Image (cartoon, coloured by chain):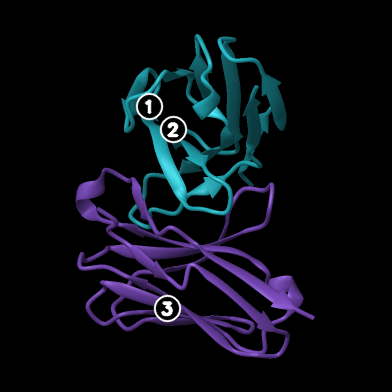
Amino acid sequence: TQLLEQSPQFLSIQEGENLTVYCNSSSVFSSLQWYRQEPGEGPVLLVTVVTGGEVKKLKRLTFQFGDARKDSSLHITAAQPGDTGLYLCAGGRRDSNYQLIWGAGTKLIIKP
Amino acid sequence: SQTIHQWPATLVQPVGSPLSLECTVEGTSNPNLYWYRQAAGRGLQLLFYSVGIGQISSEVPQNLSASRPQDRQFILSSKKLLLSDSGFYLCAWSGGDASYEQYFGPGTRLTVT
């Protein structure tokens, strides 16, 4: 059972376009993280959201946690080739003993 | 600041050979430690996690094992590798706080031939 559904699985767009990646669940999370991973490297934490409705911005990236803390989105404005990578969402739950529940990832390619 | 090291970076091993991957963390004490495996371009599969020295929990039945001989050292082992053990292995640590944030090492690319 995939507790965190991430979509789309793959996205290829032109430089300058906007995009949104979604992370959905039927479960409530105490916190949700977004990571970016480049080929051959470990994932790097981008942001953590913990409050329902919370919005955080990191330059051209906007992260939102759903009001019910069951879903999240990542919006990139004016995508750049440097945004290319695998984006992973992961959620923490009080009953998870500090393990994260991971989405399957969104492979993003930004073409110049 | 905290840093996490993994070695080796790449490894090519024949089927049936043993395996030992090492992970060490600096700059923090009593971290939670994790071993993951990742298929190409896909999400992470948790293999083992540890909340303290000698405390190992296994998430997936397989021919791999893990040990934590010291507070900031985590080792992934196998007595006999299978072809299906090929993949990208990642070690991560967390502070065990309510943020659940995990920080990853650079990974080991294992190819079993």
Q: Which mark is residue B21?
A: none
State which chain is coloured cyan.
B
- Residue in the image at 64% along x and 34% along y: B108
| Quadrant location of the C terminus of chain B in the rendered image | top right
Q: Quadrant of residue A55?
A: bottom left
Q: Amino acid at mark 3?
A: Ser
- Residue in the image at 67% along x and 89% along y: A78
Q: Which residue is mark 1?
A: B52
- Which is in the foreground here, disc 1 or disc 3? 3
Residue B15, given in percent of the width and then of the height, sits at 59, 15
Q: Secondary structure at mark 3?
A: strand
Q: Tell me the crowding category of disc 1: few under 14, some 14 to 19, or many 20 or more residues within 10 angstroms, Cα based.
A: some
Q: Which residue is mark 3?
A: A73
Q: Colour of chain A?
A: purple
Q: Is residue B64 above or below residue A8?
A: above
Q: Secondary structure at mark 2?
A: loop
- Please tell me which residue lies in front, A75 or B51: A75
Q: Amino acid at mark 2?
A: Asn
Specify whether residue A89 is in view. yes
Q: CA distance from mark 1 to mark 2?
A: 6 Å
From the viewer's perspective, tell me whether residue A3 is left or right of residue B7.
Answer: left
Q: Are marks 2 and 3 on the same chain?
A: no
The chain letter for the residue carrying disc 2 is: B
